[in-house]
Amino acid sequence: QSALTQPASVSGSPGQSITISCTGTSSDVGAYNYVSWYQQHPGKAPKLMIYDVSHRPSGVSSRFSGSKSGNSASLTISGLQAEDEADYYCSSYTRSSTVLFGGGTKLTVL
Amino acid sequence: QLQLQESGPGLVKPSETLSLTCSVSGGSIGSATSYWGWIRQPPGKGLEWIGTIYYSGSTYYNPSLKSRVTISVDTSKNQFSLKVGSVTAADTALYYCASSVAGTIRYSDLWGRGTLVTVSS
């Protein structure tokens, strides 16, 4: 299984919105509504931000939202803040009952 | 509150077996809604799912690692373990144990701090 495809980097200014894409196949992203997103700050463990495409865990800001269309999913961060600068990873449950991560996207807040 | 803590040797020789343990505190590893997993991250690189075990013993492995990986649960010690055989430098990584409070394999909302394992002679 190949890693899900994410852009290596995205950037935005404070207050703006950015979207990170995550592209897979009909065997993973397109198979179920089981895409999740993680935020990872340097030296820290990943933190779950979105699960099952668009659900936010308790405590995660409503500025984070997720969506999916076909074999691609997206994470949108609105009202960008300096603290959002981090690496972001998408993940998908697959038809083979395995989990697949994306390569990661570095978000820079200008 | 459920917490996870990885432990194990920080240095492993090539061709040997990497062994790590994840200790679970604040709850029972034998819970009927428990999936327990391992994820690794090579220095400066992305996350790679290694595998997951259900409390009953059913296991799910990354196909690219399946031939070398074993994940097991020790309910008496409230721990689960990872073994990776025939390691090479490519197995050098920060290893995280993880789980889901909601009891699913689909995502992990509970992570350990990670433990760095270096493969070198």
Image (cartoon, rainbow, N blue to C red):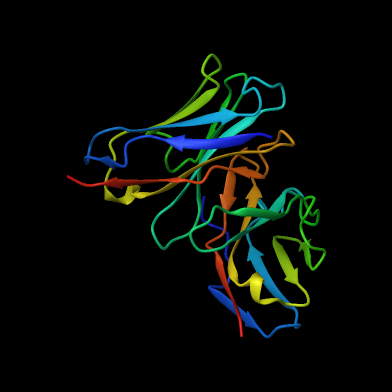
Q: Which residue is drawn at 38% across and 58% down?
A: B43
Q: In this view, does B19 lie to the left or right of A58?
A: left
Residue B24 at what x, y percent from top left?
Answer: 57, 29
Q: How many labels does the image show?
A: 0
Q: Is residue B15 above or below residue A54?
A: above
Q: In this view, does A64 lie above or below A99?
A: below
Front-most of B64 and A40?
Answer: A40
Image quadrant assignment for residue B69: top left
Residue A78 at what x, y percent from top left?
Answer: 78, 75
Q: Is residue A105 above or below residue A49?
A: below
Q: In this view, does B23 lie to the left or right of A35?
A: left
Q: Is residue A60 left or right of residue A38?
A: right
Residue A37 at what x, y percent from top left?
Answer: 67, 57
Residue B13 at what x, y percent from top left?
Answer: 21, 40
Q: In which quarter of the image is the N terminus of chain B?
A: top right
Residue B121 in sight in this render: yes
Image quadrant assignment for residue B87: top left
Q: Which residue is drawn at 21% across and 47% down?
A: B120
Q: Which residue is drawn at 72% across and 66% down?
A: A74
Q: Which residue is drawn at 71% across and 21% down?
A: B32
Front-most of B20 and A96?
Answer: B20
Q: In this view, does B94 lie above or below B73?
A: below
Q: Which residue lies furthest to the left in this view?
A: B121
Residue B108 in sight in this render: no
Q: In which quarter of the image is the C terminus of chain B?
A: top left
